[in-house]
Image (cartoon, rainbow, N blue to C red):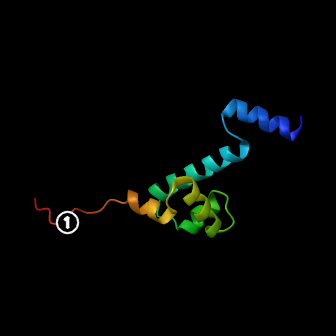
Amino acid sequence: MSPYYLAHAFKETCGSSPRQYLLRRRIGEAQNLLISTDLPISRIAELVGYDTQNYFDLQFSKYTGIPPRKFRQSFQVKPEQGKEE
């Protein structure tokens, strides 16, 4: 089976190219880790398969529209100020 045929069959079955599928999976896992852990972004980048945090930041921002740090901040619970019980 040629690489071209394999990529074509993969896209037909999964709806995206192998490269796009891998990117979606990596970014999805990174999103989960950013929300559910306090791991440093550099460590999350390593865990999802990126050699450098800079390249991870670039790819994450391109895919989601916001950098990983802002993504994480948007999911952090902020204590309500001035609330009395």
Res 83 quadrant in image: bottom left
68 lies left or right of 18? left
User: Residue 44: percent from the left, percent from the top?
Assistant: 57, 62
Quadrant of res 50: bottom right
Q: Residue at x 72, y 30 (%)?
A: 12
Question: The N terminus lies in which quarter of the figure?
Answer: top right
**Residue furthest out toward the left:** 85
Circle 1: element type: loop
Query: With 33 as the anchor, is 11 left or right in this view?
Result: right
Q: Identify the residue shown where x is 84% and y is 39%.
A: 4
Q: Quadrant of the C terminus?
A: bottom left
Q: Which residue is mark 1?
A: 81
Q: Please tell me whether residue 18 is drawn above or below residue 59 in the rendered image.
A: above
x 71%, y 41%: residue: 17
Amino acid at the residue labelled 1: Gln
Residue projecting furthest to the right: 1
Image height of 61 relative to 54, above or below? above
